[in-house]
Amino acid sequence: MTIDVQQYLVRQEPYYQPQGREVQLYEAAYRNRLPVMVKGPTGCGKSRFIEYMAWKLDRPLITVACNEDMTASDLVGRYLLEADGTRWIDGPLTTAARIGAICYLDEVVEARQDTTVVIHPLTDHRRTLPLDKKGELIVAHPDFQLVISYNPGYQSLMKDLKQSTKQRFAAFDFDYPDADLETAILAREAGIAAELAGRLVKVGLAARNLKGHGLDEGISTRLLVYAAKLINDGVDAADACRMALVRPITDDADIRDTLDNAIDAIF
Ligand code: ADP
């Protein structure tokens, strides 16, 4: 079975504004084939960064969005029943290990424990992946790298990565970009003027200050980009902010009022 590697290549340079020295540090991690963990709140640029690095390093990128129903077989592969017998189908992790891709497991903590255990042998000196059901041991391609993302804000005692998993990765801390950087990102991503982008960033800051005071998590850069796109499309700024920034993140009437008032004051 041949795998079309081309389909996994990131063809165009993704727009990525570095927040610090993460590009150089990632390159060093990749040179040493260290597994990497990117930590931070949702929508702050983790996936965009990995996409950018895959492009920069010219490696194929295989992304898997993890969820609680995901099993080890979803990552590794399984036998499929067919008319004339059974056929083995590689899972995304197996494909990545075979072709030397960067395998990005997004929100890995969502997956069941047995799933996190299958990645262990890939993350140490062994760099192997046992396909138990198939009776095959894959030695990862020399260019293969495992990357996981992790949102520390969501973790509870029940759902956290074990130390034995955490201590297999080099980690990058991500957070929302600072105001100037976020303004530049919104202006570029949505094609809006910097002045308008700056106002949206202020709404974001207002919401982020409410984290822990009624909000579990602030407004993400991703949502600010949504609002910016709506405004660029002619939607009234206050409507766009309510729709893209406030309604998705909370159902609490008081918090909605607070944020709606902030929007009216800013626009
Ligand atoms: P997550 O942290 O959940 O993986 P993403 O990487 O998908 O978040 O980021 C969400 C969106 O925010 C991106 O699609 C992009 O528009 C924007 N973004 C966030 N940070 C950056 C950045 N540093 N450079 C460019 N765009 C960014």
Image (spheres, rainbow, N blue to C red):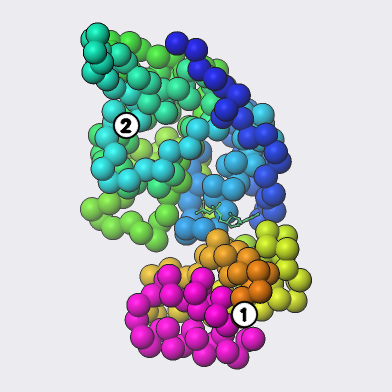
Marks 2/1: CA–CA distance: 42 Å
Give the residue at the far front of this rendering: 83
Residue 185 visible in the shown view: no
Whether residue 230 is situated above or below residue 76 in the rendered picture:
below
Count of numbered tags:
2
Frontmost of labels 2 and 1 is 1
Residue visible at 66% across and 78% down in the picture:
199
**Where are the magenta residues, as a range?**
238-267
Q: Quadrant of residue 19?
A: bottom right
* N-terminal label among 2 and 1: 2
Whether residue 193 is situated above or below residue 102 in the rendered picture:
below
In the rendered image, residue 13, in percent from the top left (x then y), is placed at 71, 41
Hey, what amino acid is under mark 1?
Ala
Mark 1 lies on residue:
237
- Which of these two is toward me, 110 or 160? 110
Residue visible at 60% across and 24% down in the picture:
6
In the rendered image, residue 100, in percent from the top left (x then y), is placed at 54, 21
Q: Is residue 73 left or right of residue 7?
A: left
Residue 244 visible in the shown view: yes
